[in-house]
Amino acid sequence: MNEAKVSVIIYVKNTVDYIEQCIRSVMNQTLKELEILVVDGGSTDGTLQLIERLKKEDARIRSYEEHGSVGAQFNLGLSKANGQYIGVCEADDYILPDMYKKQYEIAAKHRIDVLRAGYYQVCQAGGREYRFPVKACSRDELTGKVIDYSQSTEFLEQGINGFWSGLYRRTFLLSHHIQMNETKGAAYQDISFSFLTQMLAERVWFMGEAFYCYRIDNPNASVNSIHGVRLHRKEYAELKKKLLANGWWESYKNLFFSWELVSYRWFLRELPKSVRKENAEAVYRYLRGQMEESGYDKNTVIEGVEELADSLDQGMEPFIHKIFDGMGQSDELLFYLEGSFRKEARVVLFGVGHLGMIAKQFLELCKKEVVLTDNSRGLQKSGFMGERVFSPEKAAEYYPDEPYLIANTFHGQEMKEQLQKLGIPDKNIFLCSNEEFFLRKIFVSYEEDGRDNKYER
């Protein structure tokens, strides 16, 4: 075999339903000079036998066993890797064929420390696969070129976003002793890895293309665990130890605090409604204590969590309110969809942007007639993908008694007030403003147990 350009680490435990697709997606990469390092954590469901069968097909596959934790599995794989660059593919995900060829060509040419690409959130519904793209970087002006972060914390300020979506230069990881935490368990052990790589990387590249397919409908995924608060706390405690041990704490503690706020907000909003409040109270007490002990400056947190940091200083109730701000609308939408929505034949969709197109796919999956409306005069004139787009005024005139689904992340309340002024009853208006919630709690649950249509008439 030629010298490996990329070493792909796959850590696995009891994912027999997904592991073959995962490994084959790496085997079928157009970049052939790679090695596939599969590290099993003690599978008992037939995963090991499947890995052995695939090894007979492809000599590039090497397998190991490490029963400690996901972090220990990754670290073992890293210690066995020989490639110039390190890739990661989690066992229930898969990648598109050109991922490592295109990424390696860029990374090697420009000697990139960390390359990130876009990715797809993927789920199965109605007998087909749906892919929803996520950008590697929210700022388009930073995409497709070398970014020098040697004198900047800007990469770190972007937070965690798909650490498995690209490549890491192996000598960069080794020279800085960057590994995953080996704490017990199988969740969130990428936090320290992501923080340290983003803190220490000097040459970074963001790709506009998406290659990695991140499965959001695996019921056994760590994001579905109600123990996430405890696991988050452990991982951030380990990261803090590393920052203190290396003399980095004072310089980076406010960014550390920002990451905690982002992580806990995301996780708490993923929890079932019945356990949100008690977990949020525990998070408040923990973060409040950390804030006082470490002397965090709430005025220097990253963009997007300024108000959350301020609410932490105001007390438990303001903090909990800010954490779950907007979740009431999502819960109302979920209640409607699990109830009277079944009887609907037609739904008026207000908003034909990114979130609107996700909602449109869902409505069509549920076999509803979808009427499009938008405030864009251009869309009203030209239509969208061959379909007519009504002005809100015309939609209200033609469909005064139909349910209206507003799909907009930032202007939903204004759009609701607009419909109310046009005479649409409040009981007929539902807001879809949280893409993550809509995908994970609604789209993914279209089929219960893979059999019954949950929302269709």
Image (tube, rainbow, N blue to C red):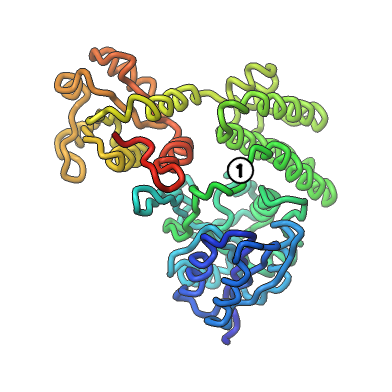
Image quadrant in which you'd find residue 446: top left
- Amino acid under label 1? Glu
Which residue was labeled with disc 1? 157
Observer-nearest residue: 307 or 412? Answer: 412
Query: In the picture shown, does residue 57 fall above or below 272?
Result: below
Camera sees residue 450: yes
Does residue 140 sit above or below 432 in this rendering?
Answer: below
* Position of residue 305 in the picture relative to residue 281 (left or right): left
Judge whether 455 appears above or below 73 on screen. Answer: above
Left/right of residue 204 with respect to residue 330 in the rendered view: right
Q: Circle 1: is it few (<14), some (14-19), or many (20+) Cα within 10 Å?
A: some
Which percent across, then down, holds residue 122?
44, 52
Name the image quarter holding residue 88. bottom right
**Front-most of 441 and 16?**
16
Query: Which quadrant is home to the N terminus?
Result: bottom right
Q: Residue at x 57, y 71 (%)?
A: 50
Q: What residue is at 76 percent from the left and 43 percent from the top?
A: 234
Single out the residue that lies furthest toward the bottom. 1
At x 69% / y 17%, what residue is drawn? 315
Report x, y in % for residue 283. 70, 29
- Is residue 205 visible in this depiction of the protein? no
Residue visible at 46% across and 74% down? 28
Residue located farthest toward the right when viewing the structure as drawn: 245
Residue 295: x and y in percent read 79, 30
Percent x, y of residue 64: 70, 72
